[in-house]
Amino acid sequence: MNNQIEKWVRPEIRALAAYHVPDAGDFIKLDAMENPYTWPESVVDDWLNILREVSLNRYPDPSSSELKEGLRREMAIPPNMEILLGNGSDELIQMILLTVLGQGRKVLSPEPSFSMYKMISTFVGLEFVGVALDDNFELDLAVMLEAIKQHQPAVVFLAYPNNPTGNLFDDTSIRAIIEASPGLVVVDEAYHAFASRSFMDKLPHYDNLVVLRTLSKMGLAGLRLGLLVGPKAWLSQIDKVRLPYNINVLTQASTAFALKHHAMLEEQTARIRKDREALMQQLASLAAIKVYPSQANFILFRVPQGRVSAIFEHIKGKGVLIKSMHGASPKLAHCLRVTVGTPGENDAFLAALKSAL
Ligand SMILES: *Cc1c(COP(=O)(O)O)cnc(C)c1O
């Protein structure tokens, strides 16, 4: 049996560690950037009435046209730009990479950043080049431009705001990277709902820029819907590797419904932005830790050397699950990341952290 695995499973797959998602159990879950708020009962009732009408015996609308209309309206998508939908934005990252796949081709992204850029590059068979951010987690433009010149990447990913650091990279640097890139530049705006800036309105200025968004961090993580927005020339090619019916009927109907209640989601994300500032101030008042600025729904902070595991475990012992970034990248040594939850959850986390320190 093991002989077969060694003979047939690609070495780069055998070398990968599976993407590990810890069992949440009864923890207060502040590890995965989820929106902690649910819907009022009357809204849930209206939603269930819509689902009653969905035909599970039929294939979904292959182009999700009603859904795209709703997204175009709510996300200020420029009129001459196309939309491509994915089963989460993770699937769109995979589709982009399958489209450019080829011997010796490379994908480039700053590091630390979203782990799936490297993971998906590796499993589709593209070489991944990580370029270190500076000590403030800002793009080191000279180093980025040199790496682009040297490696000629097919795709550059820029998470904006960046995960797991929380900051928005400098706009002028991003523009210089788009202009210097020989291939596609993907600005990944997964945390757009919590940020003050976007590249969506810059799309018409570049023919090698696409913007990636997701509904996951806005409050619909369970639905799995991501969208890629950009020029038709690129999107019509990427669309060819999409599996037919990748957006199921329940997701299509539920997302169209949720978009009609956009104001409710907007209220929830506004609340999270406000609570992020309160949590940030509380963290900043703790002398033992260093907090990094955030335009996302999470906060990265660094604890004293040698104590990260003990602090993480202590917080977990108090029933609060956050994420340890220690070991994920040299720049993230002794770092922990906490998702902004409800005020009560944030207080529970702060109390646990203070007692750990
Ligand atoms: C969470 C996240 C995604 C993936 O979101 P899904 O749509 O849930 O697959 C993409 N990019 C970044 C930067 C993220 O943090």
Image (cartoon, rainbow, N blue to C red):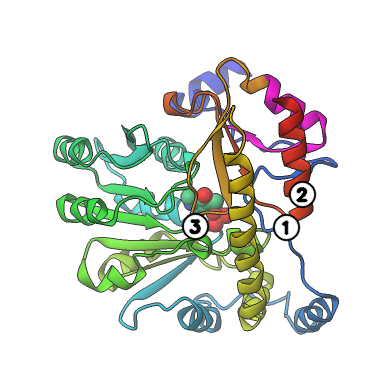
**Amino acid type of the residue tagged 3 in the rendering:** Ala
**Nearer mark to the viewer, of 1 and 2:** 2
Residue 190 is tagged as: 3
Depth check: 193 or 100 in front?
A: 193
Q: Nearer the viewer, residue 245 or 168?
A: 168
Depicted 195 relative to depicted 288: above or below: below
User: Which amino acid does the dot numbered 2 rest on?
Assistant: Glu
Report the residue marked by disc 2: 345
Magenta range: 310-324
Secondary element type, mark 2: helix
- How far apart in space, not on screen, are marks 1 and 3 (Cα)? 17 Å
Can you see residue 107? yes
Q: Residue at position x 42%, y 78% from top?
A: 76
Residue where numbered disc 1 is placed: 36
Measure the alpha-carbon separation of dots 2 and 3.
23 Å
Q: Does the magenta run of residues contain 204? A: no
Element carrying mark 3: loop
